Amino acid sequence: MKKMAVFATALLFAGAAIGDGGAHVHGEARLHIALEGDSLYAEFESPAANLVGFEHRPVNLQQEALLEQAGRTLAGADRFLLPEGAGCRLLEADVEVPQGSQTGGHASFRASYRFQCDNLARLDTIGVALFTSFPGIHRIAVQWLTPEGQGATSLTARNNQLQLK
């Protein structure tokens, strides 16, 4: 878990360096992807409103259940559709579920993932299935870093395939 935290920090700094303003915009989320060694790392962040429809503290059991369900959904390996030939397995998923803002501020979900891949060279695309589970997400700003280079793009429900090569 410590390695993921160090990597997450590196991703956030890399995002800031290549123009990620970090603005909290409903309907939009952010995804950072990095390939290193035999691992695929992903960091996802979204306003809570995109996933559960609110950002305040839960006011009833139904809202508490929505937060818990969104967290379980984010923790699933099937949020990312990876080519079978790459042989990737989810090793860690760390999901931070917000408890809501007390002051009317912005609450966000954050999730970190680490996959181990048998053949990282075959990982040329990543399908992002978050749009199906969370229709409140309209656009995901993606930044990626691979041994071959880096890039940035936007994904939508209609265009949910990240091309790494």
Image (cartoon, rainbow, N blue to C red):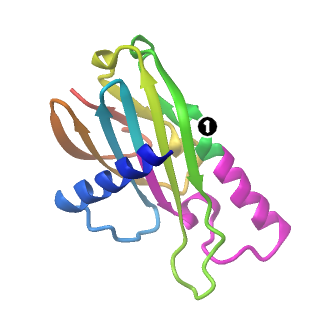
Q: Magenta span has 70? A: yes
Task: Using a 10 Å C-alpha cutoff, classify the residue at mark 1 as few (fewer than 14 neighbours), some (14 to 19) or many (20 or more).
Answer: few
Q: Which residue is drawn at 48% across and 33% down?
A: 80
| Quadrant of the image containing the C terminus | top left
Q: Is residue 22 visible?
A: yes
Q: Where is residue 36 in the image (x, y as percent from the top left)?
A: 29, 32
**Highlighted range, magenta:** 43-72
Q: Which residue is drawn at 61% across and 66% down?
A: 98
Q: Residue at x 64, y 44 (%)?
A: 73
Q: Residue furthest top?
A: 85
Give SS at disc 1: loop
Q: In which quarter of the image is residue 148?
A: top left
Q: Magenta span has 91? A: no
In the displayed structure, 39 sits above or below 97; it is above
Q: Name the residue under label 1.
A: 76
Q: Residue at x 37, y 51 (%)?
A: 6
- Seen from the viewer's position, the closer of residues 58 and 133 is 58
Q: Position of residue 121 (x, y in %)?
A: 27, 17
Q: Where is residue 114 in the image (x, y as percent from the top left)?
A: 46, 36
Left or right: residue 26 versus residue 61 is left
Q: Position of residue 66 (x, y in %)?
A: 73, 59
In the displayed structure, 13 sits above or below 37; it is below
Residue type at mark 1 is: Gly
Left or right: residue 46 versus residue 54 is left
Q: Total label count?
A: 1
In the displayed structure, 43 sits above or below 85; it is below
Q: Residue furthest front?
A: 2
